[in-house]
Image (cartoon, rainbow, N blue to C red):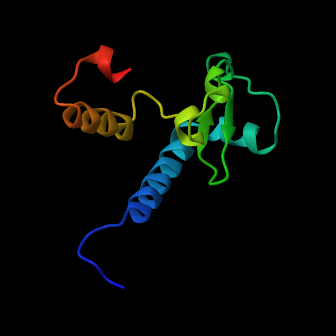
């Protein structure tokens, strides 16, 4: 059924597609290491306990896994700080939160 508006599922799928495209440009070695379940050699990334989720998106682990939150809240998507996608997402949430400062955004 065609509608004039995108559904939540369509938006989520689009985000996953763009994230997967970005990660393949910035993290090809990390993806290879995670797919083969070998040791992550980049020390900065290894500290974040990265893993591939069921959609093959790189997420980070950590101390939040024991909280009563959804998996996507406990394990945020890993994006490089210098990619345009990360800047666009940060910009969107900055405007969405009525120009909130960095303290509110973290």
Which residue is drawn at the image coordinates 26% and 70% (left, top)? 5
Which residue is drawn at the image coordinates 67% and 52% (left, top)? 54
* Residue 68 percent coordinates (x, y): 60, 33
* Residue 79 percent coordinates (x, y): 48, 34
Q: Is residue 94 visible?
A: yes
**Which is more toward the observer, 99 or 25?**
99
Q: Dividing the picture into quarters, in which one does residue 66 lie?
A: top right
Check the image and name the residue furthest to the bottom.
1
Q: Is residue 76 visible?
A: no
* Residue 105 percent coordinates (x, y): 33, 23
Q: Quadrant of the C terminus?
A: top left
Question: Would you say 51 lies left or right of 24 here?
Answer: right
- As drawn, 6 above or below 83: below
Which residue is drawn at the image coordinates 22% and 23% (left, top)? 100
- As drawn, 86 above or below 4: above
* Residue 80 percent coordinates (x, y): 47, 31
- As drawn, 18 above or below 88: below
Question: Would you say 8 lies left or right of 52 here?
Answer: left
Q: Quadrant of the N terminus?
A: bottom left
**Which is more toward the observer, 32 or 67?**
67
- As drawn, 30 above or below 1: above
């Amino acid at each position: 059924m065609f509608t004039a508006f995108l559904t939540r599922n369509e938006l989520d799928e689009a985000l996953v597609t763009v994230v997967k495209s970005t990660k393949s440009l910035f993290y090809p070695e990390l993806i290879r290491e995670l797919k083969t379940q070998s040791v992550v050699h980049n020390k900065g990334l290894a500290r974040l306990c990265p893993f591939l989720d069921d959609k093959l998106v790189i997420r980070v682990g950590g101390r939040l896994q024991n909280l009563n939150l959804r998996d996507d809240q406990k394990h945020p998507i890993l994006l490089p700080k210098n990619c345009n996608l990360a800047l666009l997402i940060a910009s969107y949430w900055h405007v969405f939160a009525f120009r909130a400062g960095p303290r509110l955004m973290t």
